[in-house]
Amino acid sequence: MFKKHIGFLTALSIGISLVGCVEEFEPELQEFEDNLVVEGTITNELKHQTIYLNRTYTFEEEQPSAEVNATVTVEGGGNVYAFQESRPGTYTSINEFRAQQGTPYQLRISTHDGVKYHSSEMQLPNSTDIDELYVERFTTDLDEEGVGIFIDNENVLDGSKNYRYEFIETYKVIAPDWNNTALINVPDVVCDRTVKTTRERDEQVCYTTVASNAIILANTENLSGNNLRRFQIRFINRDNYIISHRYSVLVRQYVQSNEAYSFYETLRDFSGSESIFSETQPGFLEGNIQEDVNTGRKVLGFFDVATVSEKRLFFDYEDLFPGEELPPYADPCQRSAPKIAEGHGPEPRCILESLVNLDLIRFITDNEEWEGPQSDGGPFIVVPRVCGDCTVLGTTEVPEFWFE
């Protein structure tokens, strides 16, 4: 199931005066405003549609607070589609529905404190499918070698010229130092009773799924034939461990209105291709949502109606780099032999026991059987957990769509 990755806008307006291109400047931070942040795209897919509501937040806060207990509806074609809060700040339509061509849709929100908002009426643009999604071994203009993921599109309908892309990548992770033997501590024994046992689950092969967090836009208005050719969705350096084995990406294409494209283009320029609604914005970015009764409250975000097309591809590292060395793993996987304890007296510092209790290491072999350069120390040769346990990076559950 596709899960949309969504960040949130920080509402600290910044006024910047540039004295010269090499002189320092001090940004003037204006008073923080607690505003509603809205993000929602209704599509032509028959599904439970989703609207996200949150509040702006300051630099000091690690994450936004969800706008809870709101009333959310979408009106269109004589129907009113009610939404319910599936988790804090996330509102999902009670019934499945899809946006229909030629029908205007409007979002309405009533917050828990009684403030009401509405969006402009938005209509579904003409549909354009992804023609080709493909991967190539690729070297950038900066001489960085890796793989490029590209799209070709042929626009056969007038009006379909604005595109926004999202992707979800899933990749196989194989722990290079997985071992069927685990270390456990014997209860009520101080320091010197860490023993071996058989591992209860296989933690060698995992799958990691990550959603894109960049604003990827394309416009074909000035292109030949109004078509998109070799448009790059993603570049992955050949030394990135995520392509070491098998990699898959699902690309979703949203055909947008001129208004929606303009909003996301401005947002992208403000945030420098970081997470949507996550960066400080220089000034107020006006969307298509406003109060029913204007009291001066600002609302940030955009309600969009878009057609969606998606494609998925798979590739193995061997397909593009046959016979070549795999990328380095996510960790150097340095081997060590932790001492049982340090210090003397009735309460020594139990090093090995602590590492096992904190689940920070994985067993490789007995120290006495190890011929490597780091054989001095405790009774076992170990590596950081990530090197012998792939669940640090993913899950052992095979995705439904996966095939070898």
Image (cartoon, rainbow, N blue to C red):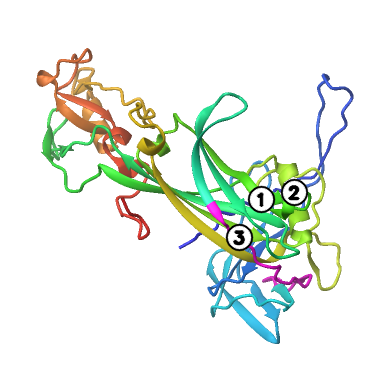
Q: Is residue 305 left or right of residue 352?
A: right
For label 2, the residue is: 223
Q: Position of residue 214 (x, y in %)?
A: 61, 46
Q: Is residue 185 at least partly visible in the picture?
A: yes
Q: Tell me the amino acid under the disc marked 3.
A: Ala
Q: Position of residue 39 (x, y in %)?
A: 66, 61
Q: Tell me the amino acid under the disc marked 2.
A: Leu
Q: Secondary structure at mark 2?
A: loop
Residues at circles 2 and 1 in contact by the CB criterion of under 8 Å: yes
Q: Which mark is residue 228?
A: 1
Which residue is pictured at 40% across the width and 34% down the height?
241
Q: Tell me the amino acid under the disc marked 1.
A: Leu
Please tell me whether residue 204 is drawn above or below residue 347 in the rendered image.
Answer: below
Which residue is pictured at 73% across the width and 57% down the height?
161
Q: Residues within 10 Å of mark 3 (few under 14, many from 20)?
A: some
Q: Position of residue 245 (x, y in %)?
A: 35, 39
- Give 49 or 308, whichever is nearer the viewer: 308
For label 3, the residue is: 66
Label count reads: 3
**Which range is magenta?**
110-132
- Give 220 or 42, whichever is nearer the viewer: 220
Does the magenta run of residues contain 128? yes
Identify the image quadrant of residue 247.
top left
